[in-house]
Image (cartoon, rainbow, N blue to C red):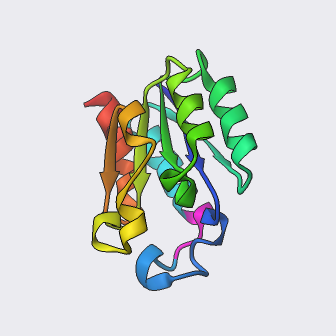
């Protein structure tokens, strides 16, 4: 199986920002570990990160028919991007929404996702392992 992992706004700063929430590993380190994890299970993972909402929407549209699943951490876009929501709704590839932190235990505005209802599922609160659990959900 072939997967696309998309990381949104501010996730390029993982490892440098709010280490108590997001950990000390960089996004590049997390992606390398995820790629190895997918490969160890006989699968392939590609990675994309952008702070630009339109680029995320375009990448979702380009993914249709080219991947078996998408793991998406949209960052703050999770809470208000109807454009990303519509991009997910407009493709046939299943998307699992991911958050490293437990957003329900954080600020009030983080508790509502406009993406969840168009996603296959949502995994949150397990740090970088949230991504691994999302990948596993496609082949278990």
Identified at 69% across, 47% down, the residue is: 53
Q: Is residue 2 magenta?
A: no
Rendered-image quadrant of the C terminus: top left
Which quarter of the picture shows residue 129?
bottom left
Q: Give 54 or 132, whichever is nearer the viewer.
A: 54
What span is in magenta?
25-29
Image position, residue 133 (x, y; %): 32, 48
Asked if residue 136 lies left or right of residue 77, the reply is: left
Q: Position of residue 32 (x, y in %)?
A: 56, 55
Q: On the rendered structure, is 93 left or right of 133?
A: right
- Residue lying at the far left in this picture: please name it: 140
Q: Residue at 46% of width from left, 31% of height from top? A: 43
| Count of numbered circles on the image | 0
Asked if residue 21 is positioned above or below residue 52 in the image, the reply reads below
Relative placement, left or right, of 133 versus 46 is left
Percent across and percent down for residue 37 are 43, 47
Q: Is residue 17 above or below residue 117?
A: below
The majority secondary structure of the magenta stretch comes to: helix
Residue pictured at 37% horizontal, 55% vertical: 112
């Amino acid at each position: 199986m072939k997967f696309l992992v998309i990381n949104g706004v501010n996730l390029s700063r993982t490892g440098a920002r709010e280490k108590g929430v997001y950990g000390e590993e960089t996004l590049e380190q997390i992606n390398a570990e995820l790629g190895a994890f997918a490969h160890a299970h006989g699968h392939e993972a590609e990675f994309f990160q952008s702070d630009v909402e339109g680029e995320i929407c375009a990448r979702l549209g380009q993914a249709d028919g080219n991947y078996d699943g998408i793991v998406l951490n949209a960052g703050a876009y999770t809470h208000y991007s109807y454009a990303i929501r519509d991009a997910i709704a407009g493709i046939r590839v299943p998307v699992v929404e991911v958050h490293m932190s437990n957003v329900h235990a954080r600020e009030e505005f983080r508790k509502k996702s406009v993406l969840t209802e168009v996603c296959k599922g949502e995994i949150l609160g397990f740090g970088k392992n949230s991504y691994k659990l999302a990948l596993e959900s496609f082949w278990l």
